[in-house]
Amino acid sequence: MIRAYLPADRPHVQPGLLFSRIEQAERDRYASALGPSVVTPLVDRPDLARALNLGQIWVKDETHRMGLPAFKLLGARFAVATLLARRRITPGCTLVCASEGNHGRAVARAAREVGCQARIYLSHAVATPRADAIASEGAVVVRVGATYDEAVRHAADDAAREGWAVVSDTSWDGYEEVPRLIMLGYSQMVHEMHAQQPPGWRPDVIAVPGGVGGLLAGVALGAAEVWASPPHIVCVEPDSAACLMASARTGAPTRVDGPFTTEMGGLRCGEVSPLAFAMAAPHVAGYVTIDDAWGACALRMMARPPEVSLTRVEAGLSGAAALAGLMALRSGADAAHACEALRLTGKSTAVVIASEGVTDPPLWARLMGEGESPAITPAT
C-alpha cells in the first residue's frame, strides 16, 4: 500500500526556525575536531537508478556510523558533548532516554565515553537483538509499555523524580534544548554529502525516513544551509505509523493511534516531536507511506547489487525505507501525480538516506531469504 501527500501551500520558511549561525559554528567546530574518519560514504548505485528510471541514485550509507550501525550517534554524541560544555550534565550522572533501539544505543555509547551512566527505556515491542545491543554498551535497559510513545513518558517521569538527565531526540513542552542539539548534529550529514561531490552538485530529491521527525528536520535544515535552492525533501513512513504525514495534513502535531503493525522498528512512532515537525514542515515537499513489503524489496535490492563492482549496502528494514518510498513513487500507478510535482524524471538525481544497518539479524536474514526482489515497472 502507498499513500502520498504533497502540501499544496507550504508555509513561508521562517528564519527563526533555522539553525542560527552560532549553532552552525558550534556544530562545524565539533565536526572538524572529529576529523574525516567518521564521515559515512555516499554510494553511487546506478543499478537502482536504472530500476527506478532515474538519472542517478546515491545512497548515504549510515549503516556504520562511528562504530554503530545507525546514524544516531551523529546527534547523540554532539548533544552530550555540548551539554557537558554548557555544564548541563557532569561526569558520573545518569542519562536517560526512550528508544526503539538505535537512539538508545547511541546515548548509551555517548554516556560511557564521557563517564556517565545510561538508563534506556524500551517498549515491549522492541526486538531482543536491539535491546541486547543497548545493554552491551553498559546501559540499564528498562522495558515499559506497549509503544515507544509510552516509553517516552515513563522515561521523562522517572528522570524528573530521580534527578536524571534526559537525552531525548523527541521534544515536548518545555523540553527542547536537547532535541534541537540532536537535530543540529544530524544536519552535518548534508554537509558531508555536499563535500563528497564536485562543486555545483545538487540532488533533485533527498528521501528521508520519518520516525518522530528529528532526522527529517536535520536533513531539511542542513539542505537549506547548503543550497540556495534546496532539493525536494521527501519523508517516508510506514503506513501504520505515519504521524508526520498526519501532522502535515492538519498543520499541527497529530497523534496516530495505530495499531503499529510494521516491523520497521526505528519508524514505529505514533507521535511526532513537535519541535522537529515545526522546523521540518516548511521544507518538506512530500510525504509517502509504504508497507513492509516495499521496505523488504528495497532492503534486498541494496544488499544484492547485480554487478560485483557496485557497493553492497546492508540496511535494516527501517534503513531501507527511504529507497522503498522512491520505489513506490516510481512504480505506483496512483503516484504519477506525485512524481510530476516532485519533478522525478528519468534525468533526476536522488539521494536516499540508509539510516540503519542490520540491527535485528533474525529479521534481516528472514527478509533476505524471501527470494528475489519482485520486478518493478518504473514510471516514464
Image: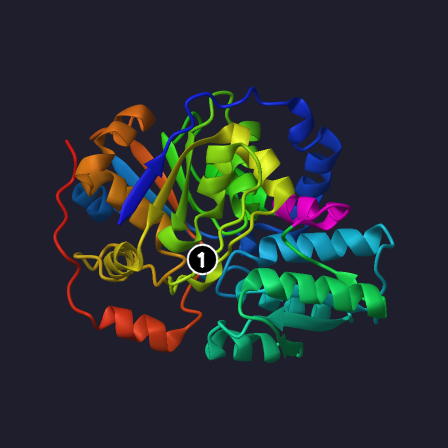
- Depth check: 33 or 295 in front? 295
Give x and y (percent) for residue 182: 65, 49
Q: Is residue 319 left or right of residue 250?
A: left
Q: Is residue 377 visible?
A: yes
Q: Which residues are magenta?
A: 171-185
Mark 1: which amino acid? Gly
Total numbered labels? 1
Find disc 1 in the rendering and name its residue: 258
Q: Where in the figure is residue 239, as x and y percent of width and height?
A: 36, 51
For label 1, the crowd category at 10 Å Cα-Cα, with few meaning under 14, some 14 to 19 and many 20 or more, is some
Where is residue 166 shown, x and y percent of the image? Answer: 74, 60
Q: Is residue 101 above or below residue 335?
A: below
Q: Is residue 363 above or below residue 374?
A: below
> Would you place residue 253 above or below residue 122 in this image?
above
Quadrant in which the C terminus appears: top left
The structure residue drawn at horizontal position 31% and vertical position 55%, both measured from the top left corner, is 291
Residue 83 located left or right of residue 65? right
Give the residue drawn at x 21%, y 36%: 334
Tell me if residue 337 comes above or below residue 123 in the rendering. above
Image point (48%, 47%), residue name: 243
Indicate yes or no whether the magenta region holds residue 178.
yes
Secondary structure under badge 1?
Answer: loop
